[in-house]
Image: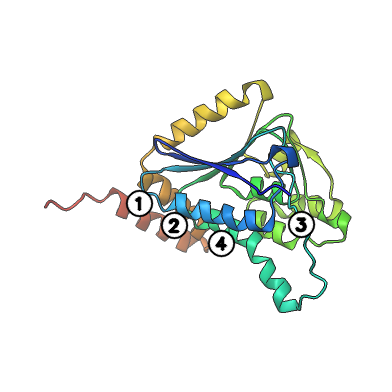
């Protein structure tokens, strides 16, 4: 089995990770998941970058997990739980990145691929892309995938997607809150590039503050959310002390 490869690029204030296994629908092995999380953390720590982009090569954005050759039959519950860290580490790296992480889903995302796309801060999808959380059809409760999108997809929509295992098109994914914007396939490359370029031109401090507020304030009571908003704004807008 060929090793999974990533194409990593730093271009101006944009850091990008290309899933580069098109002959296998960009499915990720367990070592590849660990590597992906590492790349996300490394790029996020580069203060020259303002935006991180996850994209892929070939026709499919990400076909899910590649578990071929794995044997878990002899693992204890504790050992089995530890194997989940490879997947959870990717979601944690996206959330922990201080700057926005974008998914450019020019093709379909299935299983982990749907969670990867939906778990990013912003998800642009081509109108030809399709998405599915199909784990239930394989006898697996997709709690890991659910954890990636739990705060992004409304409960009723997520419940339907998880229990049905249904494949939905990009327009339905937009309606369900799984993606942020749908772009015609023939315009996807140009329009997604323009969006990334414009977003990456914003000051990093502004982008960091927006993500910090959204991550931390979502479940705060309204008075605390308001106070936190004011405090963050004051810190960002305060004049720098003269040297």
Cβ atoms under marks 2 and 4 closer than 8 Å: no
Percent across and percent down for residue 108 are 73, 38
Q: Earlier in the sequence, mark 3 or mark 2?
A: 3
Of 162 and 9, the residue lying toward us: 9
Q: Residues within 10 Å of mark 4 (few under 14, many from 20)?
A: few
**Tag 3–tag 2 contact (CB < 8 Å):** no
User: In the image shown, does 68 or 152 lie closer to the viewer?
Assistant: 68
What is the spatial separation of the Cα atoms under label 2 and label 1, in whole angstroms? Answer: 11 Å
Which residue corresponds to the image point at 87% horizontal and 57% vertical from the top-left? 138
In the image, which is nearer the foreground, mark 3 or mark 4? 3
Q: Earlier in the sequence, mark 2 or mark 1?
A: 2
Foreground disc of the pair 2, 4: 4
Label 1 sits on a secondary structure element that is helix
Q: CA distance from mark 3 to mark 2?
A: 45 Å
Q: Against 196, is 152 above or below?
A: below
In the rendered image, which residue does mark 4 sit on? Answer: 219
* Mark 3 / mark 4, whichever is N-terminal: 3
Residue 236 screen position, x and y as percent: 31, 50
Residue at 68% of width from left, 66% of height from top? 84
Question: Which mark, residue 233?
Answer: 1
Q: Earlier in the sequence, mark 1 or mark 4?
A: 4
Q: Secondary structure at mark 4?
A: loop
Compare marks 2 and 4 and give the one earlier in the sequence.
4
Q: Please give left or right for residue 49 compared with residue 72 in the image.
A: left
At mark 3, the secondary structure is: loop
Q: Which residue is mark 3?
A: 67
Instruction: Report helix, strand or loop for mark 2.
Output: helix
Q: Which mark is residue 226?
A: 2
Cα separation, mark 1 vs mark 4, equals 19 Å
Position of residue 78 measured from the top left corner of the image (x, y, whole percent):
70, 78
Residue in view at x 70 percent, y 37 percent: 22
């Amino acid at each position: 089995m060929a090793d999974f490869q990533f194409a990593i690029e730093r271009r101006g204030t944009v850091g990008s990770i290309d899933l580069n296994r098109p002959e296998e629908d960009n499915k990720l092995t367990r070592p590849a998941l660990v590597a992906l999380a590492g790349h996300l953390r490394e790029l996020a720590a580069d203060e020259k970058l303002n935006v991180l982009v996850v994209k892929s090569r070939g026709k499919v954005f990400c076909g899910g997990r590649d578990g071929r050759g794995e044997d878990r039959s002899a693992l204890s519950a504790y050992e089995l739980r530890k194997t989940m860290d490879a997947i959870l580490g990717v979601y944690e790296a996206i959330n922990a990145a201080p700057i926005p992480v974008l998914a450019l889903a020019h093709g379909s995302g299935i299983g982990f691929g749907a969670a990867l796309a939906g778990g990013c801060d912003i998800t642009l999808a081509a109108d030809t892309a399709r998405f599915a959380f199909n784990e239930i059809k394989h006898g697996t409760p997709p709690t890991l995938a659910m954890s990636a999108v739990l705060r992004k997809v409304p409960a009723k929509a997520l419940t339907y997607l998880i229990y049905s295992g249904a494949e939905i098109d990009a327009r339905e994914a937009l309606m369900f809150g799984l993606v942020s914007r749908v772009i015609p396939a023939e315009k996807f490359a140009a329009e997604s590039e323009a969006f990334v370029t414009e977003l990456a031109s914003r000051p990093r401090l502004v982008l960091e503050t927006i993500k910090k507020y959204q991550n931390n304030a979502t479940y705060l009571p309204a008075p605390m959310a308001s106070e936190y908003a004011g405090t963050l704004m004051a810190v960002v807008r305060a004049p720098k002390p003269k040297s």
